[in-house]
Image: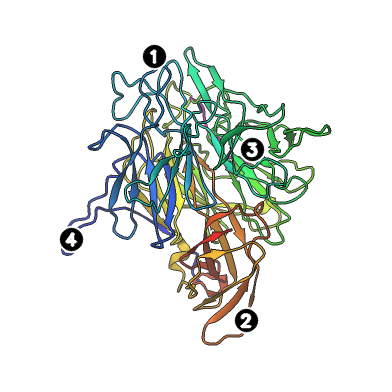
């Protein structure tokens, strides 16, 4: 048999009329520093939302976002409305610059974005802004993006706009992490989303900062609330301990709690449901102190497979300095199983082909991890964000039960440098969208997007889900039919990515049973058992043919996904 196909990259081109027209690489109009897959549950169409939040633009002089339509390659602009309340007396006008905000998919299919950057607007910032050198950095705004607005053109809404006091967070936050909760015990908080960390301010001289260390939780009726008992203050307070990577623990004695993994050497559990009774608390250090700090590394929970008793998290790359961006990345990884009662880290040196930071790690439908973009960095002043870009992607196979047998395989290089402010997303057609880089930092500015077609798209005929399906429920089996026999089903959450962090990424394996064939291939599928394994919301439902069906005999072949709402 042939070797597995390596896949290929191609830029996204400007749509042109039919005929012998030259291909022109499309300008994304914004640096795609923030990006989310969005889905309109009425039209059944998916697109990519992205933004940078600079400059004020359009006929209304507003902060705007952009949406890329994969069917037409057209890009459209959306106004983000101003925050409706007046700032305190003496403060300048503060536009909703959702730059370095947090974002997460919500249970109803909308997207929450909270936090961002505060800059002086007099004089107006240049198109690609510099970071402020003194004073406040964060904003406390909260916005909701609706892919199916009641009034076309009004996708963006202020959270809580129906109330007298829109739902602002208590603290300004620049680089916050948002995490959707799963199962909420009766009598506990009524929250659905937790916000953690982010700079309130970052001043001159360097290394003078204030982190927002008091977490809050959000519900649609009351907005943001503090946790009810003392002791919720986050224990990590380093200069770079913003955007702490978070994972909802799916199983084991800590199911439903949040695991915060990096950049700090010491990871923590946060129990949002602690009731104040002794013999416990909101926070618990876990896993021991790692050797490596991991600034701008990635943290990825491996696909959760039935019976959902294991939940391994892998940390890849990042730089080991906790005092400067001007530092070098590492090629080591750390692995931990957060479903265990006493989890411990496993460290592997020289795991990856390339040391990288500012990269992304994408879970593909065949369970492999796709590490893409980033840079090695430098110890030279003001070079850490963009020096020495890494062009070659890597495919990481973690299927062997023995961690020591995991391997990383070098894959084709993308065209453009992808450094700080790079974004990448798994698309519902099983391709990968790559964009961004630069803006406000000493890194290459890239305003073009690229598409990676993984090798599995060249390995044989793809299966097709024949059944129209749009909703599934916990513990309620559902039926599908496919055109070809399949071996694997995966439920993958729509992505929401920025700064090496995807606050929504999750892949869940589903068990199934084949029924008698009647010209198609029927299957009865068991959904996730509860919201700790898979929080409610929109997911991509992929089916995959077995490896034996591929040309190489080594690659599962995925379908185009059906996007379903899990509730």
The reply to whether discs 4 and 1 touch (Cβ–Cβ < 8 Å) is no
Q: Which segment did they paint magenta? A: 326-333
Q: Which residue is mark 4?
A: 17
Foreground mark, 2 or 4, reads 2
Foreground mark, 2 or 1, reads 1
Q: Main secondary structure of the magenta part?
A: loop
Q: Which residue is mark 1?
A: 90
The reply to whether discs 3 and 1 touch (Cβ–Cβ < 8 Å) is no
Q: Which residue is mark 3?
A: 261
Nearer to us in this view, 486 or 84: 84
The reply to whether discs 2 and 4 touch (Cβ–Cβ < 8 Å) is no
The CA span between labels 2 and 1 is: 70 Å
The CA span between labels 3 and 2 is: 42 Å
Q: Residue at x 39, y 47 (%)?
A: 49
Q: Residues within 10 Å of mark 2 (few under 14, many from 20)?
A: few
Q: Secondary structure at mark 1?
A: loop
Instruction: Please tell me which of labels 4 and 1 falls first in the chain.
Output: 4
């Amino acid at each position: 048999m042939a070797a597995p196909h390596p896949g290929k990259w191609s830029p996204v081109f400007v749509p042109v009329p039919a005929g012998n027209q030259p291909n022109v690489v499309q300008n994304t109009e914004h640096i795609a520093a923030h990006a989310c897959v969005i889905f309109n549950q009425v039209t059944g169409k998916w697109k990519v939302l992205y933004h940078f939040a600079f400059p004020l633009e359009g006929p209304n002089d507003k902060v705007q976002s952009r949406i890329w339509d994969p069917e037409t390659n057209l890009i459209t602009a959306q106004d983000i409305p101003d925050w409706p309340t007046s700032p305190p007396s003496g403060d300048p006008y503060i536009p909703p610059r959702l730059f370095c905000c947090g974002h997460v998919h919500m249970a109803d299919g909308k997207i929450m974005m909270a936090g961002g950057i505060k800059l002086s607007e007099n004089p107006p910032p240049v198109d690609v802004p510099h970071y402020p050198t003194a004073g406040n950095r964060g904003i406390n705004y909260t916005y909701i993006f609706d892919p199916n607005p009641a009034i076309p053109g009004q996708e963006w809404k202020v959270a809580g706009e129906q109330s007298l006091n829109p739902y602002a967070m208590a603290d300004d936050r620049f680089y916050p992490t948002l995490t959707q909760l799963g199962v909420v015990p009766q009598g506990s908080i009524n929250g659905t989303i937790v916000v953690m960390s982010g700079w309130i301010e970052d001043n001159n001289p360097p290394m003078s900062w204030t982190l927002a260390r008091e977490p809050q939780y959000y519900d649609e009726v009351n907005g943001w609330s503090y946790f009810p008992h003392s002791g919720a203050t986050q224990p990590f307070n380093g200069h770079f301990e913003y955007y702490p990577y978070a994972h909802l623990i799916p199983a084991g004695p800590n199911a439903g709690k949040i695991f915060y993994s990096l950049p700090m050497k010491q990871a923590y559990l946060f129990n949002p449901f602690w009731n104040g009774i002794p013999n416990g608390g909101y926070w618990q250090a876990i896993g021991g102190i790692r050797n490596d700090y991991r600034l701008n590394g990635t943290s990825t929970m491996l696909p959760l497979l039935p019976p959902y008793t294991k939940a391994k998290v892998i940390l890849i790359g990042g730089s080991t300095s906790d005092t400067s961006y001007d530092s070098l990345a590492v090629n080591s990884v750390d692995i931990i199983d957060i479903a265990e009662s006493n989890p411990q880290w496993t460290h592997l040196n020289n795991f990856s082909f390339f040391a990288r930071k500012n990269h992304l790690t994408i879970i593909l439908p065949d369970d492999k991890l796709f590490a893409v973009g980033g840079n090695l960095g430098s110890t030279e002043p003001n070079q850490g964000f963009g020096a020495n870009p890494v062009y070659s992607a890597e495919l990481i196979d973690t299927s062997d039960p023995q961690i020591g047998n995991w391997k990383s395989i070098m894959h084709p290089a993308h065209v453009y440098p992808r450094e700080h402010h790079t974004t990448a997303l798994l698309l519902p057609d099983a391709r990968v969208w790559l964009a961004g880089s630069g803006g406000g930092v000493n890194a290459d500015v890239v305003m073009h997007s690229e598409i990676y077609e993984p090798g599995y798209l060249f390995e044989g005929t793809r299966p097709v889900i024949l059944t129209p399906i749009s909703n599934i429920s916990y513990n309620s089996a559902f039926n599908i039919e496919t055109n070809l026999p399949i071996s694997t089903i995966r439920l993958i959450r729509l992505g929401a990515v920025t700064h090496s962090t995807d606050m929504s990424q999750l892949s869940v394996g589903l068990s199934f049973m084949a029924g008698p064939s009647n010209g198609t291939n029927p299957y009865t599928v068991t959904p996730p058992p509860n919201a700790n394994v898979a929080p409610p919301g929109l997911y991509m439902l992929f089916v995959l043919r077995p490896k034996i069906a591929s040309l190489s005999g080594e690659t599962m072949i995925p379908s185009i996904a059906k996007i379903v709402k899990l509730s």
